Image (cartoon, rainbow, N blue to C red):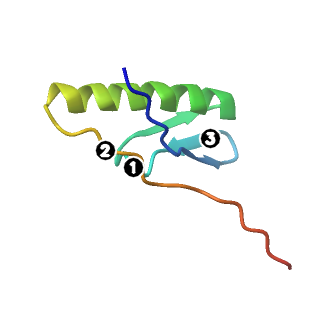
Amino acid sequence: MNQLNYTVILEPSESSYGAYVPDLPGCVAVGATKAEALELIQEAIEFHLEDLRDEHQPIPTPQTTSEIVTVNT
């Protein structure tokens, strides 16, 4: 089985963390902690890809990257 590395975006709120995958529209998760959100998005990605395979749809190749940019304030 091949491995794919998708970029996951984590967004904290006052009471939880949201996670989504830019390369997989609709693939989202919410957890009470960062660790839980990462665990849940891992499962969401696996289910999302399984659904695509079941529907004979192509598996999107990861395209999104991220970098940290430092600016002076």
Q: 38 and 68: which one is in front?
A: 68
Look at label 2 and name its amino acid.
Pro
Indicate which label's residue lies in the foreground, 2 or 3: 2
Mark 2 — residue?
60
Of pointers 1 and 2, the one earlier in the residue sequence: 1
Residue 51 lies left or right of residue 25; in this view the side is left
Q: In screen coordinates, is 29 left or right of 71?
A: left
Total residue callouts: 3
Please report contact status of discs 3 and 1: CB closer than 8 Å, yes or no. no
Question: Where in the figure is residue 72, as x and y percent of width and height?
Answer: 85, 78
Q: Quadrant of residue 31?
A: top right
Residue 50 is left or right of residue 38, and the answer is left
| Whether residue 47 is visible | yes
Q: Calculate the distance from the C-alpha at mark 2 to the C-alpha at mark 3.
A: 25 Å
Q: Which residue is mark 1?
A: 23
Q: Please tell me which of labels 3 and 1 falls first in the chain.
A: 3
Q: Quadrant of the C terminus?
A: bottom right
Is the residue under label 2 in contact with that under label 1 (CB below 8 Å)?
Answer: yes
Q: Residues within 10 Å of mark 1 (few under 14, many from 20)?
A: some
Q: Residue at x 56, y 43 (%)?
A: 18
Secondary structure under the numbered disc 2 in the rendered image? loop
Q: Residues within 10 Å of mark 2 (few under 14, many from 20)?
A: few
For the point 49% across and 28% down, the residue is: 42
